[in-house]
C-alpha cells in the first residue's frame, strides 16, 4: 500500500504555469516542510552542496522584475510581449525557490578525492536535481503547484547583488510556486519498455 501511495505522490507532480497567490498555508509551515525535505536529499559523498533561497512577497516579485528587465535588454522588441507575458505568469505565483550549488564544497571534495575530481560537478548537479524533484513533489502534495525555469546565467549577477548571495553559489534553476489555477492536461509518455530494460 505504501508503494502505491508514493507512486501517487510522484504522479501528482506536474508542470503548472497558471499559478496564483491565494495560498492558505502559512509561510512558516511551507518553510518548515521545505527545510525538512532539503535535509533528507541525498548526495554523493554526502557533499550536501545544494543550497536554496526561498523568496516570498517583495523578494519573489523582485526576482521576476529582475528577470523581465534583464530579458528586455536582450530579446528583440517585437518579440518581447510574449516574453513579458511568460515572466508575468511566474510573478503571479506566491513564491519562488532559487536553487544553487556551493562550488566551494565541490572544489574541496575534488581536492580531497582527486581520483574522482572530474565527477564531483556532475554529482552535485544530480543531487540538485533530486532536491528540485523532491520539493516539486512536496508542493504538489501540499495542494500547491510549480514549474521550473532556467534564466541563469543572465540573472545571476543581479540576484547575487540583491540577495547577498555568496560568490561560491552557482545558480541552477528557479521554481515559482503557488495556488494552482488550472490543472495541466495529459502529457505524452513513451512506452515504458523503451525506457526500462529488465535483465536476468
Image (tube, rainbow, N blue to C red):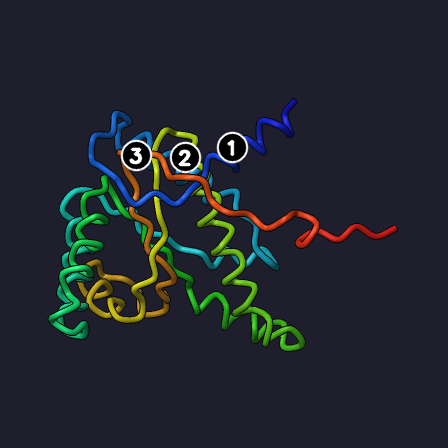
Disc with the residue nearer the chain's start (2 vs 1): 1
* Residue depth check, mark 3 versus mark 1: number of the one nearer the observer: 3
Name above or below for residue 25 compared with residue 37. Answer: above
Residue visible at 12% across and 70% down in the picture: 78
The residue lying toward the viewer, choosing from 147 and 82, is 82
Q: Residues within 10 Å of mark 2 (few under 14, many from 20)?
A: many
Label 1, secondary structure: give it. Answer: helix
Query: Which residue position holds label 2?
Result: 140
Quick check: 199 left or right of 121? Answer: right
How many numbered marks does the figure carry?
A: 3
Quick check: 174 left or right of 120? Answer: left
Residue 18 marker: none
> Where is residue 196 drawn, in percent x and y?
70, 51
* Residue depth check, mark 3 versus mark 2: number of the one nearer the observer: 3
The residue lying toward the viewer, choosing from 131 and 8, is 8
Q: CA distance from mark 2 to mark 1?
A: 8 Å
Residue visible at 31% across and 67% down in the picture: 152
Query: Which residue position holds label 3?
Result: 182
Quadrant of the image occupied by residue 183: top left
Label 2, secondary structure: give it. Answer: helix
The answer to whether marks 2 and 1 mark residues whose Cβ atoms lie closer than 8 Å is yes
Quick one: which residue is furthest to the right in this view?
200
Disc with the residue nearer the chain's start (3 vs 1): 1
Name above or below for residue 84 compared with residue 61. Answer: below
Residue visible at 50% across and 72% down in the picture: 107
Query: Which residue position holds label 1?
Result: 9
Q: Residues within 10 Å of mark 3 (few under 14, many from 20)?
A: few
Amino acid at each position: 500500500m505504501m508503494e502505491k501511495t508514493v507512486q501517487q505522490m510522484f504522479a501528482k507532480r506536474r508542470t503548472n504555469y497558471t499559478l496564483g497567490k491565494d495560498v492558505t498555508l502559512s509561510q512558516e509551515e511551507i518553510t518548515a516542510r521545505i527545510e525538512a525535505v532539503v535535509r533528507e536529499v541525498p548526495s554523493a559523498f554526502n557533499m550536501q552542496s545544494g543550497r536554496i533561497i526561498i523568496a516570498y512577497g517583495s523578494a519573489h516579485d523582485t526576482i521576476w522584475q529582475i528577470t523581465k528587465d534583464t530579458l528586455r535588454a536582450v530579446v528583440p522588441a517585437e518579440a518581447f510581449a510574449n516574453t513579458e507575458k511568460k515572466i508575468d505568469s511566474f510573478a503571479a505565483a506566491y513564491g519562488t525557490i532559487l536553487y544553487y550549488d556551493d562550488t566551494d564544497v565541490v572544489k574541496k571534495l575534488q581536492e580531497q578525492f582527486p581520483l574522482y575530481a572530474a565527477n564531483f560537478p556532475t554529482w552535485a548537479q544530480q543531487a540538485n536535481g533530486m532536491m528540485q524533484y523532491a520539493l516539486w513533489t512536496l508542493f504538489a502534495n501540499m495542494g500547491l503547484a510549480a514549474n521550473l525555469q532556467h534564466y541563469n546565467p543572465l540573472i545571476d549577477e543581479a540576484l547575487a547583488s540583491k540577495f547577498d548571495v555568496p560568490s561560491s553559489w552557482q545558480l541552477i534553476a528557479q521554481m515559482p510556486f503557488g495556488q494552482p489555477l488550472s490543472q495541466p492536461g495529459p502529457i505524452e509518455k513513451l512506452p515504458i519498455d523503451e525506457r526500462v530494460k529488465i535483465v536476468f
